[in-house]
Amino acid sequence: MTRKEVTPQQARCPICSAEHVGRLLKPPKSRAGRRWVPLTAPALAALARHRAAQQIERDLFGVDYDDHDLVFCRPDGTPLRPDRVTVEFEQHVRACGLPVVRLHDTRHGACSLMLAGGVPIEVVQMILGHAGPEVTRRIYKHMLRKETAKQVEKASKLLTRHRPKRKAP
């Protein structure tokens, strides 16, 4: 079945029974899709501010708030359209003076930063929801090579730091 061939039953929202055009709320593909993701203090603070603003919207809409238990949604609680998320992401990136990249590339960027920061491959795999560390290794082998070379250089310096200096001939 192609993406466009969605039966009416599949297109019905399990929360409100409405049809959200271009959006299909469904559980993750695998157990790895349900996961804990560590967040930095600034990210947690931003999410707390967002949740407080969202509560104000809930209160304003009252019984008309269409609660889908989403972190990011329209002011009335209905799901966002994926194309609008992309457009708004690109607008935000431009406003920050950064080069526009695909939204999915931010996932690759986060992974690259974690690997460069020395986060163990098993932890990165868990955060990304890959089936196993071998998947992460295969996708990000270019990053691992750079980091491995740096780590080997660091180990070499540890081995030789107490070596007496040799006199030049």
Image (spheres, grey):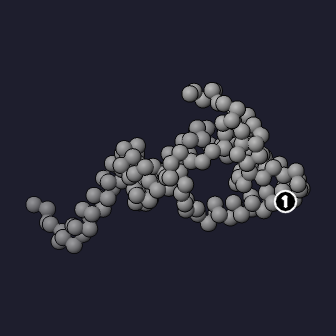
Q: Position of residue 121 (x, y in %)?
A: 39, 56
Looking at this view, is 125 or 31 the one in front? 31
Q: Position of residue 5 (x, y in %)?
A: 63, 26
Q: Is residue 168 visible?
A: yes
Q: Position of residue 40 (x, y in %)?
A: 58, 63
Against 12, residue 44 (above or below) is below
Residue at left 54%, top 57%?
35
Against 55, residue 26 (above or below) is above
Q: Position of residue 113 (x, y in %)?
A: 48, 53
Q: Residue furthest front?
A: 9
Total labels: the figure holds 1
Would you name the residue on which mark 1 appears?
56
Quadrant of the drawing holding the N terminus: top right
Residue at left 84%, top 52%?
65
Q: Is disc 1 surrounded by few (<14), some (14 to 19) or many (20+) residues within 10 Å?
A: few
Q: Residue furthest left?
A: 169
Does 130 sit left or right of 99 as displayed? left
Q: Is residue 110 visible?
A: no
Looking at this view, is 5 or 102 the one in front? 5
Label 1: state its secondary structure. Answer: helix
Looking at this view, is 145 or 51 the one in front? 51
Residue at left 81%, top 49%?
66
Tag 1: amino acid: Ile
